[in-house]
Amino acid sequence: MPDTFDWSTKRVIVTGGAGFLGRHICDLLGDRGVADDRLFVPRRKDYDLTERDACRRLYREAFPGHNADVVIHLAAEVGGIGANLDNPGRYFYANMAMALHLIEEARADGLAQRNGTFLQTGTICAYPKFTPVPFREDEIWNGYPEETNAPYGVAKKAAWQMLDAYKLQYNMHGVYVLPVNLYGPHDNFDLHSSHVIPALIRKCIEAKDRGDDKIVCWGTGSASREFLYVDDAAEGIIRAAEVMQDPTPINLGASFEITIKDLVELIVRLTGFEGAIEWDATKPDGQPRRCLDTDRAKKLLGWQAQVGFEEGLKRTIEWFVAHQHDAEARV
């Protein structure tokens, strides 16, 4: 951590701080020295961040009589391929509106004058469908995103451009990170709206408990993905807030890829499911390949992933088994 960055003196807003990634971020901020009364997590029932008035009120009410020094914007409306296909308009609007209003109201609240920082989490869904592997940040504009998640990806990419414009015009410190697919304890295990790892873990555990003779998986299994354990992502995001003052895009990943077929077989083995695997090729595979180049994160942040993939899967499976009866609440 840079000697000049003292979290104990900062007032920090974390949107999405009660969510999957957010709770890990907040725990780590506490370890870094952020006191409870200097950390504010807006809840959706109190602040609809797609509305400008709610964002303006957030900055006024988070720390009465004081202003925020760091805003970490994690809140998003997001899901797997099925959820993206069902909600393209909502996902574009919600994610674009939240970023648009939060960034502008941070400017109006004087964040730049206080040398404060606005960190926006992006998404690798913003990369072009046929980006050369490994994905390098300089490729992000060289094509259109994969169709099933393009509205979400474009909204997130537009937020990056807004931060870049606000740096140029207002000298507001913006930070932009691109985490690869995350997984770990406290994830969303809803079978329709979750991403692939939690969905597969739940599918395998429940099939095993019922004694099913098979599970059915979307697509052909040929697509590849990269996954980052949530604790590693939290560390990378906080490091970026500590050391960056401009929205140079930075990939956060584990620098490996695995085919969905191999992933399913690994989760089947780790969960102990003994049935067959059936593929529904009528369902889309999504983007053909995803694997990130993380050299920029190593160079600018001094950061790289620490948790091995199989170890991370074991921790995630153990957590789900312990909280299996709460699965419907993991949405």
Image (cartoon, grey):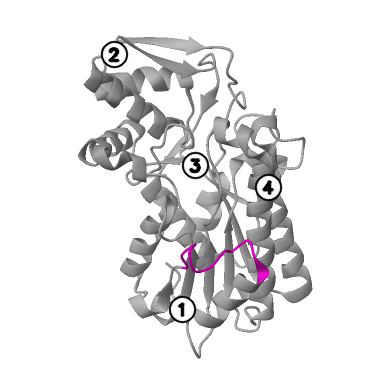
Residue 46 among those drawn in magenta: yes
Q: Quadrant of residue 176?
A: bottom right
**Quarter of the image with the C terminus in it:** top left
Highlighted range, magenta = 42-52
Tell me the distance, in whole angstroms, between the alpha carbons under discs 4 and 2.
Answer: 38 Å
The earlier-in-sequence mark between 3 and 4 is 4
Disc 1 is placed on an element classified as: loop
Residue linked to disc 4? 92
Name the residue type under label 1. Answer: Arg
Name the residue type under label 2. Answer: Asp
Tell me the distance, in whole angstroms, between the alpha carbons under discs 3 and 4.
Answer: 24 Å
Disc 3 is placed on an element classified as: loop
Disc 3 + disc 4, Cβ < 8 Å: no
What is the crowding at mark 3: few (fewer than 14 residues within 10 Å), some, or many (at least 20)? Answer: many
Residue 186: percent from the left, percent from the top? 34, 47
Of circles 2 and 3, the one toward us is: 2
Residue linked to disc 1? 11
Residue 107: percent from the left, percent from the top? 68, 76
Residue linked to disc 2? 212
Of circles 3 and 4, the one toward us is: 4
Disc 1 + disc 2, Cβ < 8 Å: no
Residue linked to disc 3? 253
The reply to whether residue 131 is in sight is no
Tell me the distance, in whole angstroms, between the alpha carbons under discs 2 and 3.
Answer: 35 Å
In the figure, is residue 57 to the left or right of 26? right
Tell me the distance, in whole angstroms, between the alpha carbons under discs 3 and 1.
Answer: 28 Å
